[in-house]
Amino acid sequence: MKKELYPVSDSTGHHINTESKHQLYVEVSGNPEGIPVVFLHGGPGSSCNNNHRRYFNPDHYYIVAFDQRGCGMSTPKGELTNNSSQYLINDVERIREYFNIKQWLVFGGSWGATLGLLYAQAFPERTSGMILRGCFLAREQDLFWFAQHGASDVFPEDWQAFIKDIPVDEQSDLVAAFYQRLHHGNKDTQLKYAGIWADWSSKVATHNLRSGAAKRTPDEDLVLKVKIETHYAVNRYFIEEDQILRNIDKIPRVPVTIIHGELDQTCLLRTSQQLAAAIPNSELIVLADTGHLIEESNMIDALVDATDRFAETLRTPH
């Protein structure tokens, strides 16, 4: 029998100050005496929602979820100053210290997996285990597949809609082309290109869902979200090329489960295969008929099963 999400549990919101004007919005739920886990959302530029804490048994876990800088209910919304991977890594550690947690399970998918790996490499002694989904390693080849050439061959009609308003002489660097329009264009230009970027991203991510995803009418929130995403992309996620794999020996020797849908066209399966091959004793679970999204049925089953198994094996590190 497939596992399902746990019921929505009550949560408490916190606002945590940083070294700058950024203030982080953090929600905690579950059992304060349970296994601490931090949920790292994707994007960059996305945010957490109530369903994210439902992947964990609230009787067994103390669940911490937060909106990354400029995202969701963190403020200032959309702020890009002092907003880079290193700041986010330090924010995760700042939140751990705020709640006086000794160690925690790191749970993240897509960009959240990237951030989780960077955090575990920076603070290995604070990481009790990892559950990673649809891994993104933030290399040139990973970004190139999504935003230059690769997924373009899988969804040719949608790709033409993505690039048709970009002049030919700018199409050799589409991330830079969209960045220029989103960060330096007028309001109408920003709305237009945020919508185009989001439509392409949604098509690639949701292609495995029967209903697909309804196109979102561009608004200011979408502009801010895509601005953050392109801010990170144009800066190559503020890390060195292939930094994660080159520093893989810094990952602590803790249980690591990697789950990936074989039909994922946002982050390719080979990325998680490379990661699993590099991490000794890691577990790679490949899901048939499954794409990128955390909400897909097979993914829910696998992730909830993974958190249930971790709950049986991890000692409460308070």
Image (cartoon, rainbow, N blue to C red):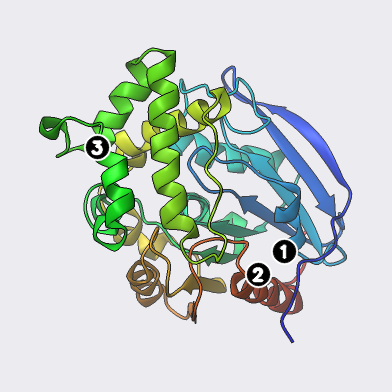
Q: Position of residue 249 (x, y in %)?
A: 38, 65
Give the label on residue 300, or none. Answer: 2
At mark 3, the secondary structure is loop
Q: Residues within 10 Å of mark 2 (few under 14, many from 20)?
A: some
Q: Amino acid at mark 3?
A: Lys
Please state if 7 lies on the left or on the right of 145 as rendered.
right
Which residue is identified by label 3?
Answer: 164
- Looking at this rendering, what residue extends furthest in the left direction? 169
Label whose residue precedes the other's in the sequence (1 or 3)? 1
Which residue is identified by label 1?
Answer: 55
3D distance between C-alphas at marks 1 and 3: 40 Å
Q: Amino acid at mark 1?
A: Tyr
Q: Is residue 159 above or below residue 55?
A: above
- Residue 121, can we see it? no
Q: Amino acid at mark 2?
A: Ile
Label whose residue precedes the other's in the sequence (1 or 2)? 1
At mark 1, the secondary structure is helix
At mark 2, the secondary structure is helix
Residue 264: image quadrant is bottom left
At horizontal 33% and vertical 42% (from top left) the residue drawn is 239
Q: Nearer the viewer, mark 2 or mark 3?
A: 3
3D distance between C-alphas at marks 1 and 2: 7 Å
Q: Is residue 204 above or below residue 304?
A: above
Label whose residue precedes the other's in the sequence (2 or 3)? 3
Residue 300: image quadrant is bottom right
Q: Position of residue 115 (x, y in %)?
A: 49, 49
The quarter of the image holding the N terminus is: bottom right
Q: Position of residue 213 (x, y in %)?
A: 55, 52
Q: Nearer the viewer, residue 295 or 245?
A: 295
